[in-house]
Amino acid sequence: MSTPPPAPGAGRADGPSVRIGALAPLTRPGWAEAGRHLLAGLELAVRDVNEADGIGGRPLELLVRDTAADPHRAAAAVDELAGLGVAAVAGEYHSVVARSAAARADAIGLPFLCSSAVLDALTDQPTDWVARIAPAQSHGWRAYADFLLAAGHRRVAVAAQTSVYWASGTRVLRDHLAPRGGTVIELDMSALTPEAVCDALVDRRATALLLLVGHPEPAVPLVRSVRRDRRLAEVLIGAPAGQPELPEWASLLGADGAGIPFLRYLPDSLGPLGARVGKTLREQLAATPSFVAFEGYDTIAVLADVLRSHGTGRADIAASWPHVDVEGTRGRIRFSRTPGIDVWQWTWPPVRVVDRDPGAVDRFRIRHVG
């Protein structure tokens, strides 16, 4: 799948295209709705670039590959895209998949600008080939832990599936909560039914349950079970990974999906660029655009600026990360080296803890500013 150059009359870009590879989960078992939002942002930004004379008069072209949340498929796509002559690869939502893509891009010398994956250890060693738009997990999840503490939650249960990503998130929460009097109670979702989780919450006297699980399974049935258990009426359900952000959450859970705080990487209000992009994305998606869609747009905004100012050579792109200074939809984007993170990192996108308003599930409330 690719985004073709604009039709005659749509913009001024002409000549041989500059190709960018794009990775996104567009089919199951990937979170396809997240992938659709990510791709919408990427494609809108490409269209805007081409309507503004492209890259020195050459159109920007997106070559899209579906990762389906498969790390091996992502690595193979990186190799394929490199063979097709892309200047860089962009995108991906799932952290474990992005880690595989980043490792392969680093190994073959192909710039990779990661849009949405947050795992701190995106690579095993320092690299100049990889940069990231999304905040690191440790940064966002510490803000979430601060929200829990401010709300009075000291006994926090995590219902977790087996994954490097979920294990990393649990570790961030424990390391931040423990010195402040908090306790993390781990509940293994490979061994427990939703009903057994409810019993464990009662037995362990947890005041909050965090969903470190996939969507819609088992997140949706787990929420339904907790909501229907009268013993747990005062227990907070949380989802730091952002499952409630996308419209499918509200359509599946309705009122049960409200009041579940999650991390969202949008500012309190958008500036002119963000407002314009948000309006167009809303029309394009026929739904409220998620922060993932804005991450996609910002990814292309950065790459277009780099390509225009530093050229289309792969080594030139990789050398440009420390010089990036671009106005994105959610603020000024600059990359830096951050302790514990081996890629070039935007420090930092806006981080908010929000939830869906119980009075109107399509409306979001800000609960904490990170």
Image (cartoon, helix red, strand yellow):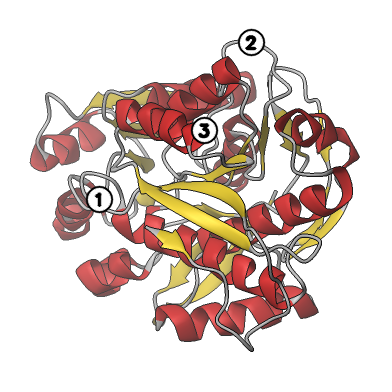
Amino acid type at circle 3 is Ala
Query: Given this view, does label 3 or label 1 mark the residue nearer the observer?
Result: 3
**Disc number placed over residue 125 in the picture, else none:** 2
Element at label 2: loop
Q: Nearer the viewer, residue 59 or 203?
A: 59
Q: Are marks 2 and 3 in contact (CB under 8 Å)?
A: no
On the image, numbered disc 1 is attached to which residue? 232
**Disc number placed over residue 315 in the picture, else none:** none
Relative to 130, say whether 60 is above or below: below
Element at label 1: helix
- Residue at screen point 35% across, 33% down: 157
User: From where the camera sits, is residue 183 visible?
Assistant: no
Give left or right: position of 196 versus 227.
left
Give left or right: position of 236 versus 145.
left
Dot 3 or dot 1: first in sequence order is 3
On the image, numbered disc 3 is attached to which residue? 82
Q: Pinpoint residue 266: horizontal percent, then vertical percent.
A: 64, 62
Q: Pinpoint residue 178: horizontal percent, then vertical percent.
A: 56, 20
Q: Pinpoint residue 188: horizontal percent, then vertical percent.
A: 22, 24
Question: Label 1 to label 2, Cα distance in Å?
Answer: 44 Å
Q: Pinpoint residue 113: horizontal percent, then vertical percent.
A: 63, 40
